[in-house]
Amino acid sequence: SIPVAEDKPEDLEDRPPIITVMGHVDHGKTSLLDYIRKAKIADGEAGGITQHIGAYSVDVDGKRLTFLDTPGHEAFTAMRARGAQVTDVAIIIVAADDDVMPQTKEAISHAQAAGVPMVFAINKIDKPGANPDKIKEQLSTMNLLVEEWGGKYQAQEISAKHGKNIDELLEKVMLEADLLELKANPNKNAIGTVLESSLDKGKGYVTNMLVEGGTLKVGDIILAGKHTGRVRAMLNEKGRNMKAVPPSSPVSIIGINGAPSAGDKFYVMDDEREARNIATRREQLYREQGLRTQKH
Ligand code: GDP
């Protein structure tokens, strides 16, 4: 791996939390992420046309929150399998007209294993069959007692579809994030994680990434998995051209010579040749491992 200098305490500044929404299929992950995006990003934006770049940042009461919007915990699982841990707070969404389901339990154990604090969103409370207390009851049998019942877990009844109580949910998420006192050093070469990448006919390889530390700039030399390149252009989730991207921000970049995998770390390097050498060595290593395991 790449040696990264440790940050000095005086170099650290507050950074926004990175939030993941997880839960059982059809319990409302996409609806919640879509509602927050529409309600919060477009604020004051002409047109309000947003790009899907795997994550987005929103401002709530002057504070910034970044949401991973690859719904489902498949992305989370894939990233964790690669050792990537990008989430600071997990929203576990449970439909109030259903039960705590196997995928809900899986999401909870992922968050617990990663030591990520959880906030429960009890969704679809607009539905006639909704029974939020039943969900809280089921959670309590898993040793997850919600705050209003004397426990330590924050829960919020919501309707993602109608946008009900979403501000209240976001406040609880912010409270949870505040306790973490999240910091990053914005004044160094950027490091972060690849969210997704694809080949665009016109643009070439497009890589969506999350900057976790440092500031990513146009012209930077990047090493991402077994690929390298120089950042030619960067777009944010509003489709705006960016010159510099600070910590906890998603960005879509052009300039990498291939498609790194979701969960690959990226590093900005000073020396282009060194970056290429490492990429080549990794490529060889992956090929040898691939031959051994017959997986790739
Ligand atoms: P996902 O699979 O977890 O991403 O779930 P979706 O967001 O796709 O939602 C599944 C279905 O539930 C869709 O038909 C949504 O319109 C519906 N849905 C989501 N949230 C709510 C809600 O708060 N109330 C109602 N009535 N329906 C909802």
Image (cartoon, rainbow, N blue to C red):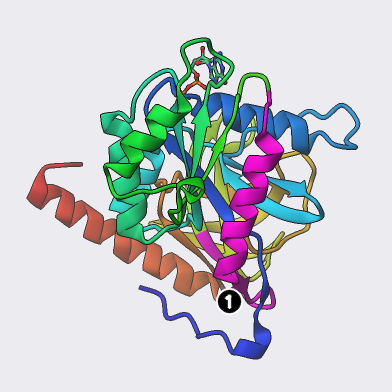
Give coordinates of residue 241: x percent, y percent. 79, 46
Of residue 63 and residue 148, the one placed in the foreground of this image is 148
Determine the residue positioned at 76% across, 31% down: 39
Give coordinates of residue 70: x percent, y percent. 50, 36
- Write the start and end of the magenta stretch as one range: 163-192
Q: Is residue 18 left or right of residue 143?
A: right
Please, is residue 197 above or below residue 171 in the view? above
Q: Quadrant of residue 26?
A: top left
Give coordinates of residue 201: x percent, y percent. 58, 27
Helix or strand or loop: what does disc 1 sit on?
A: loop
Q: Is residue 47 left or right of residue 74?
A: right
Badge 1 crowding class, 10 Å Cα cut-off, few under 14, some 14 to 19, many 20 or more, is: few
Q: Quadrant of residue 159?
A: top right
Q: Is residue 284 magenta?
A: no
Q: Is residue 46 visible?
A: yes
Question: What residue sits right under mark 1 in the picture?
Answer: 270
